[in-house]
Amino acid sequence: MQIRELELHDAANFVDLLKQIEEESKFMLFESGERKLSTDQQEKNIEIFKQQPNSTIIVAEENEMLVGYIAATGGEANRNAHIASLTLGIRKTFQNQGIGTALIGALEEWAREHRIHRLELTVAIQHEKALSLYDKGGFEIEGTKKHSLRIGGLFIDEYYMSKLLN
């Protein structure tokens, strides 16, 4: 398993990864088929991320296939440039193998090198696997975002979680 930053040549494989994760998970923001991403659009997105000193996408790769990712989107103003909002996804067949822990560890290393002080995310309160992963990674619940998602016709609450880095 290789953990590394996403590169421009990964665009097509990253689109495939996102589509599969969105198809397999009921907790990702976009539903299966909702996001219409092309390789060209993804190449542009990667270029934009690479230009931002406080944003990155780190991927897990197994046998030349992308199997998971963690994206950090940094704040755009001086007052919040020290913050990165996270999104994490792993193909279902690769879950429970330590990939999430490895991705979070790699992102924390990157964040410290790039002077990011606060990592933050939201997670559906019913998503027990993700909650366990983030808890194990040192993230703390700060609050509840009421009825923030609608999944299967039901309103779902999310936790705000964060981790401060030294």
Image: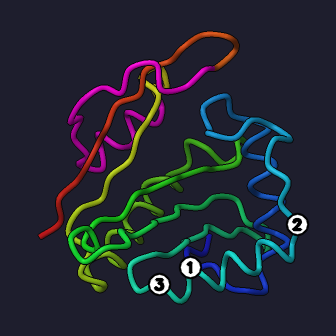
Look at the picture and state if 31 lies above or below 166. Answer: above
Figure check: 1 above or below 138:
below
Q: Is residue 148 magenta?
A: yes
SS label for mark 3: loop
Which residue sits at x=80%, y=47%?
Answer: 20
Name which residue type carries label 2: Ser
Residue for point 44% across, 35% down: 123
- Measure the C-alpha gap from mark 3 to mark 1: 5 Å
Mark 1 vs 2, N-terminal side: 2
| Quadrant position of the C terminus in the picture | bottom left
Residue 145 falls inside the magenta stretch: yes
Q: Which mark is drawn over residue 52?
A: 3
Q: Picture coordinates of residue 147 (x, y %)?
A: 46, 19
Q: Which residues are magenta?
A: 129-150
Q: Are marks 3 and 1 in contact (CB under 8 Å)?
A: yes
| Circle 2 Cα neighbour tier, 10 Å, few/some/many (<14 / 14–19 / ≥20) | few
Q: Is residue 79 left or right of residue 126?
A: left
Q: Position of residue 72 (x, y in %)?
A: 45, 66
Looking at the image, which residue is at 61% across and 44% down?
95
For residue 49, which numbered disc appears in the image?
A: 1
Q: Which residue is mark 2?
A: 38
How far apart in space, not on screen, are marks 3 and 2 (Cα)? 22 Å
The residue that appears at 60% across and 75% down in the rendered structure is 2
Residue 55, given in percent of the width and then of the height, sits at: 45, 75
Amino acid type assigned to the residue bearing label 3 in the image: Gln
> Which amino acid, mark 1?
Phe
Task: In the rendered view, tell whether residue 116 sits above or below residue 26.
Answer: below
Residue 42 as seen in the image, left or right of residue 105:
right
User: Please, what secondary structure does the residue beneath circle 1 have?
Assistant: helix
- CA gap, disc 1 to disc 2? 17 Å
